Image (spheres, rainbow, N blue to C red):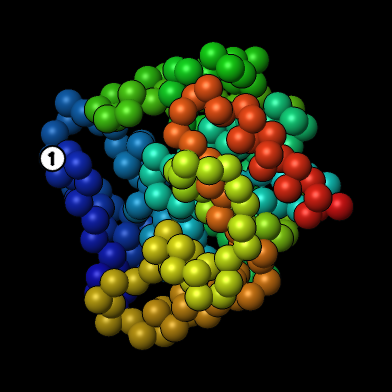
């Protein structure tokens, strides 16, 4: 981090320079893996690009129903994408995956038209997708799946609910107090680290605080076993529908 730029080194040692002026420059280590640059760009570099532009950016998957956007926020491997995939089958519309770019007052537009899913999840709902391509070098052997237009949200919505999925021996949803919510959301938000730009740091903290104060935050616990997948998500669905009425 510097005052006007952020530098990022990806897994293949490509260097990204994200500029406050509005561009991303890339120094490519090897031209053999140029196709993998797309996966790098739509992650951390693009997230910090929008951070520098004044947006609030976090690591989540977001769907919408009846004008209410619902965020599933957390670290990788906690099942955010599979929950969104399940809810698309229940007439929820898809807004964004992995990198979610949020305007002031927690307003969000469609961010992306793809999901990262395992083969098992694709088999459950293969009719939702136009195509699926294996992500090379992905440790979890996921596919990037392009979503059909009828499952995509149009226009903008306000985020009113946030669920933090965690693995547990139980299935339950519990409301997070402000302190607990801050811990999870801060850890999964794009934010300046060791930055010389104090204004950017303050703006990011203000945005995180605004999110916590205006979005109901819950912890969603369930077992990490595919045989409980439908029952646990049905349990979550009932909670969501009760809170968006």
Q: What residue is shown at x 13% (from left), y 34% (from top)? A: 30
Q: Is residue 98 visible?
A: no
Q: Position of residue 90 (x, y in %)?
A: 75, 30
Picture layout, residue 39 above or below residue 23:
above
The answer to which of 38 and 238 lies nearer the viewer is 238
Q: What residue is shown at x 36% (from left), y 85% (from top)? A: 198
Picture layout, residue 179 above or below residue 64:
below
Left or right of residue 57: residue 148: right
Q: Quadrant of residue 236?
A: top right
Q: How many numbered marks appear?
A: 1
Q: Position of residue 8 (x, y in %)?
A: 24, 56
Q: Quadrant of the N terminus?
A: bottom left
| Disc 1 packing (10 Å; few <14; some 14–19; many ≥20) | few
The answer to which of 39 and 76 lies nearer the viewer is 76
**What residue occupies the far right of the structure in this picture?**
245
Q: Quadrant of residue 200?
A: bottom left
Picture layout, residue 71 above or below residue 120:
below
Left or right of residue 62: residue 77: left
Q: What residue is shown at x 58% (from left), y 42% (from top)? A: 171
The answer to which of 119 and 134 lies nearer the viewer is 119
Q: Is residue 25 visible?
A: yes
The residue labelled by disc 1 is 29
Q: Position of residue 190 (x, y in %)?
A: 41, 63
Q: What residue is shown at x 63% (from left), y 75% (from top)? A: 213
Left or right of residue 86: residue 185: left
Q: Position of residue 6 (x, y in %)?
A: 28, 65
The secondary element bearing badge 1 is classed as loop
Left or right of residue 32: residue 60: right
């Amino acid at each position: 981090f510097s005052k006007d730029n952020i530098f990022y080194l990806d897994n293949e040692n490509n260097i990204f320079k994200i500029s406050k002026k509005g561009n991303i420059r890339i120094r490519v280590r090897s031209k053999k893996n140029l196709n993998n640059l797309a996966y790098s760009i739509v992650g951390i570099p693009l997230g910090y690009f929008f951070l520098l532009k004044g947006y609030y950016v976090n690591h989540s998957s977001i769907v919408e129903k009846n004008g209410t956007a619902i965020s599933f926020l957390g670290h990788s491997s906690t099942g955010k994408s599979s929950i969104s995939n399940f809810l698309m089958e229940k007439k929820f519309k898809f807004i964004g995956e992995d990198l979610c770019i949020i305007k002031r007052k927690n307003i969000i537009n469609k961010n992306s038209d793809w999901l990262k899913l395992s083969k098992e999840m694709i088999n459950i709902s293969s009719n939702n997708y136009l195509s699926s391509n294996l992500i090379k070098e992905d440790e979890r052997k996921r596919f990037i799946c392009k979503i059909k237009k009828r499952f995509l949200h149009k226009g903008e919505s306000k985020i009113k609910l946030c669920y933090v999925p965690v693995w547990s021996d139980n299935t339950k949803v519990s409301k997070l107090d402000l302190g607990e919510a801050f811990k999870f959301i801060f850890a999964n938000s794009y934010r300046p680290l060791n930055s010389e730009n104090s204004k950017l740091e303050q703006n990011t903290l203000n945005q995180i605080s605004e999110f916590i104060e205006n979005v109901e935050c819950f912890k969603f616990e369930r077992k990490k076993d595919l045989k409980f997948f439908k029952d646990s998500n049905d349990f979550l669905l009932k909670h969501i529908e009760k809170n968006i009425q």
